[in-house]
Image: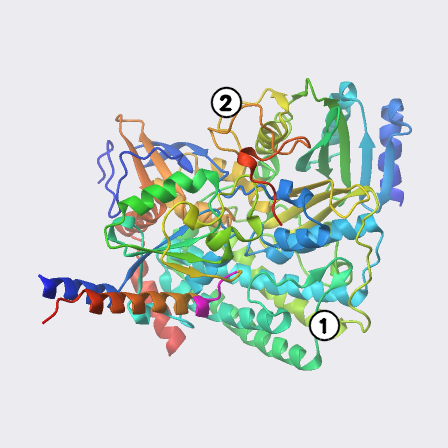
Amino acid sequence: MHDSDEFKIPLGPQHPALKEPESFSIALKGEKIMGVDIRLGYNHRGIEKACEERTYIQDLYLIERVCGICSHAHSTCFVQAVEEIAGVSVPKRALYIRTLIAELERVHSHLLWLGVAGHEIGFDTLLMYTWRDREIVMDILALLTGNRVNYGINTIGGVRRDIDARETQDILKGVNTLEERTKYYIEVAIQETTIIKRLSGVGVLFYDDALRLDAVGPTARASGVNRDVRRDDPYAAYGEIKFDVITDMHCDVYGRTLVRVKELMEAYKIIRQCLKDMPEGPITEKVPRKIPAGEAISRYEAPRGEDVHFVKSNGSEKPERVKIRAPTLANVQAVKHMLKDRFLADMPIVIAAIDPCFSCTDRLVSIKNLNGKNKKILPWESLRLYGIEWHKAHGIDMVGLNNSFRKRMEG
Amino acid sequence: MPQEDNVRQELINKFGYLQNCIQIPRPRRISVTLDYNNFAEVFDYAVKQMKFLHLCTITGLDEGENLAFIYHLAQDSGILLNLKTSVPKDNPVLKTVMPYFAGAEIYERELVDLLGAKIQGLPAGHRYPLTDDWPKGQFPLRKDWKPLGGKEGSI
Amino acid sequence: MGLIKKAVNWARIKSPWILHFNTGACNACDIEIIATLTPRYDLERFGVQLKGTPRHADVLLCSGPVTKQIEDRLKRIYEQMPEPKFVVAVGTCSCSGGVFQGCYNVEGGIKSVIPVSVFIPGCPASPKAIINGIVKLLGSLEEKEDKDAPRR
């Protein structure tokens, strides 16, 4: 059993002379987290200020790069606000194309998440196979937009590229394959006893707390909070599309996994509807370079949750003010709550389960032991390995699952 | 837009001074402009009685002599209520809304760091998003702020 | 002496250990870096391994324009890497700041903080470009190794 005054780190350097701020400061008693302090700002690039010094079109390219994983989310959310101020009526076909790309982005993001979550708990074969399948979506996106990431499909007043019949066929083929694979993942990964044991009861966030802490996205929906901007405040073509909002009552990381996987299945449905119902017509509406004075606030359901953009214009070519609230920021308070009184070994997957969009690899964790006086600093990788070793010692071993999963995927 | 009109009417019935201060630019969007002296009671009513239970974010704006703040509140119906208020720039004091929304902490810290708002009631904690050694009195989002070290915004 | 150096260099060329570090990026380059390790591109068949620590790394793969918060940590990580070490700037942002050039919290590219061996442009840099860049780096190591070999 662990000595309560210190815990052993399997690998990784310790940096006794580190002066840089740690992303997470943990107060530990034995193996339990008593308090968490989260420090953000590492990705602060000053985008909002930069937006004021660039034209709306230049801002489109800048804002796409707020986050590379949900770049279309940010780009669309921004462009919607600008179009609202300009009083532009975006052609229906463009709205459908935006919706199509939005759901394709959701697919790539959730598959990415599945892989990363697998990696955090030691289920590395899941990472390999989901990311292999994710390449199908990346290919489709590259086919439609010209780039795998950062699609640049939006322009103010519509979209920049159209989609033809052959591309439609390619998308449908890809989606069919992905749907089959996703169903398989649900069967042989998500419903495996090892996974259920590993993820259940971890990162618990009950319904009342989810509301009180104002969580968004799959994190909130896995606690039974029935909120989804696509249904509550429809944008793009969602007002005309039938889809289900996925909620779950597990209130833990397992629930968040289920929500995302089922959202994948919904995304495939929405993509097929978009392709089937896509109206003919132009894909863009001309908008003057100078946007009349006004303000608008736009909301979007990004894969991580609600994304909010506020734009104020002053009649010139450059915006007066652009405010962006990305979904991860809204879930930070909930994370602090989820970690309290829980095992340190669960920290990596709890953080991963909100699908955080802050810097992935620089997360430094400082751990202060309340029993002794030591303070250790761990890079994230060490914490991840610690978590995997700890659960192994407590009977949850991923080695068997990795082997059997690989055999089934190849057999 | 019946739902939005109902919200407007209810606010005006409760707070007569809002009579000409409420606009409905489009479905699911309501804008209210109000004096900061009245802010607390309107905010309380909107959250507790009218069930605008989700704070999307707080936008801070530099409007020359004043700093303006828009609190974006959402209801399960999908309606967004934007409460806009302002305080003088030379004394931009606000009270925290953390008692209503724990998550407001990070939005308010951002206003403190980037606009120089003075928010009473914030607990001790790290600043966000600027570095600890960021020079005092430098608020990047203010209109008159120039980047330090002469690195002008290049395009 | 020369023989050992050659062997170490050969091992390094055949199996460079890589540390991936995000210096304030939007994550697009990071996911493309991770994608190079997955089955479709499979950088590992070149012997490249992703390590979690600077102390075992030969190559530092950086993404992102350098934000003020991350600058010190980047310097420290570089200092902790044993010689010889190489830095690869992945993506336009780490090459020059990219779209974030001029932003107040951004230094503007890795080269403003530490020396860079290879620049891989792209927004994001595609997995193919990343592999190309790393192979070029390995190639230059091989050349260097030949140049440094003692004359017989």
Q: Residue at x 64, y 43 (%)?
A: A324
Location of the N terminus of chain A (image quadrant): top left
Image-quadrant location for residue A36:
top left
Q: Given the image, what chain letter belongs to the residue carrying mark 1?
A: A
The mark total stands at 2
Callouts 1 and 2 close, C-beta under 8 Å = no
Label 1 element class = loop
Viewed as shown, does residue B2 lie left or right of A208? right
Please say whether residue B94 is one of the residues in the magenta stretch.
no
Residue C146, percent across and down?
Answer: 21, 69
The magenta span reads C124-129
Residue A25 shows in the view = yes
Q: Residue at x 80, y 72 (%)?
A: A279
Residue type at mark 2 is Ala
Residue B129 shows in the view = no
Report the residue marked by disc 2. Answer: B124
Viewed as shown, does residue A227 lie left or right of C4? right
Task: Tell me if mark 2 has few (under 14), some (14-19) or many (20+) residues whose alpha carbon lies within 10 angstroms of its own.
Answer: few
Label 2 element class = loop
Viewed as shown, does residue A84 lie left or right of B106? right
Marks 1 and 2 on same chain: no
Q: Given the image, what chain letter belongs to the residue carrying mark 2?
A: B
Residue farthest to the front, as pictured? C151
In front: A317, or A185?
A: A317
Q: Residue at x 59, y 37 (%)?
A: A208
Residue type at mark 1 is Asp
The label shown at residue C132 is: none
Report the residue marked by disc 1. Answer: A162
Residue C65, percent across and down?
Answer: 49, 49
Q: Residue at x 23, y 41 (%)?
A: A8
Location of the C terminus of chain A (image quadrant): bottom left
